[in-house]
Image: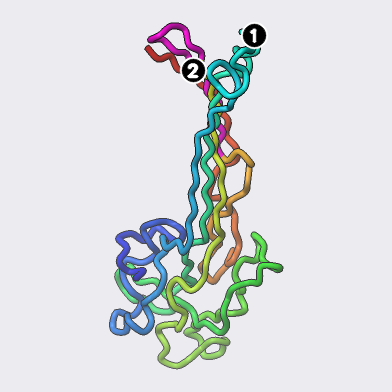
Amino acid sequence: MDHLSTSGTGNGVDVGVFRQPQDGLHRRQSEYGLSEFDVQHRFVASAVWFIPFGHGQKFGNNSPKAVDLLLGGWEFSPIASAQTGMGLTVTQSCTINLGGEMTCRPNRLANGAVPDSARSVDNWIDAAAFQLLQPNPSQAGFTPNQVYGNSGVGILRGPGMFNIDFNLSKSFAISERHLLQFRAEFFNALNHSNFSVPGTNLSAGFGQITSTSTEARIIQFAVKYRF
C-alpha cells in the first residue's frame, strides 16, 4: 500500500509519493497499489575466481619467477545485478485544495504503458491515456462535482536496472606475515545507462526521463598492505 510511506519525496525512492491518500474514505477501491519501492524481480550474482596461473595454481607451478610475478596471484571478483522497474503513480495539479499533503491524480482513459518498440527517454508514458481533471466547464475533462481522478497508485513501471561491478586484484607475498595487494575496481564496468524514473506529473516533462539512476563507469586503483 503506497500510503504507508512517511515522506513525499517522489517516485522511484523508498519513501513513496504520498503521506496521505487522495481519498481516505475509499482506500480499498482507489488507493491500493504498488509502492514506489516495489521491485517485482531482482537478480544478484557474485563470484570469486583465482586465476589459475603462478605458484600453487593449476598452471605455472614450474614457471620462471618473472612469469609467476606477472601472471600469478590474480583474483577476479564480479558482481552482476538486474531488476525490474519500480512502481509509478501519475499525478496532476489539484483543482481544489484537498488539505494536508494529499496529491491529486487524473482520470485514466487507457493503460498508459508505451510498447517496448516505441518507448524512449522522451516517451516512457502514454500521455493520451490520461486526462486532467478540469475545474472549468469549457475545458475537456470537466465533470461536475468530480474531485478525485480514477487513476490508481503504482499503475505503471519505471525503467529496470542492470549493472556489473568487478574487482581485479593481485597479491605479492613479501614474507610469511606481510602481503602487498594491488586492486583495480570497476563500478558499472560496462558503462551501461540505467535510466531514472520519468516525469509523472501530467504537465510539462510528463513521461520524459532526464537523469540516470546509476553513475557512469568509475575506475579506481588501490594498494593494500597486510601485516
- In which image quadrant can residue 21 be found? bottom left
Earlier along the polypeptide chain: callout 1 or callout 2? 1
Task: Point out residue 147 in the picture as x, y percentages from the top left corner.
Answer: 40, 84
Which of label 1 and label 2 is nearer to you? Answer: 1
Q: Is residue 30 visible?
A: yes
Q: Residue at x 64, y 59 (%)?
A: 121
Q: Tell me, yes or no, whether the highlighted magenta stretch contains residue 182.
A: yes
Mark 1 element type: loop
Q: Which residues are magenta?
A: 172-187
CB-based contact (under 8 Å), mark 1 and mark 2:
no
From the viewer's perspective, tell me whether residue 90 is left or right of residue 226.
right
> Of 72 and 153, which appears nearest the observer?
72
Check the image and report above or below for 152 versus 48: below
Most common secondary structure along the magenta stretch: strand
- Where residue 93 sits: x, y (%)? 46, 72
188 magenta-colored:
no
> Which image quadrant for residue 27?
bottom left
Residue that badge 1 annotates:
64
- Per the rendering, the mark at residue 181 is 2
> Can you give x and y, in whole percent of width and height, for residue 159 in the image?
56, 60
Q: Residue at x 47, y 84 (%)?
A: 135
Residue 160 lies, with reference to residue 207, above or below; the image says: above
User: In the picture provided, is 186 more to the left or to the right than 179?
Assistant: right
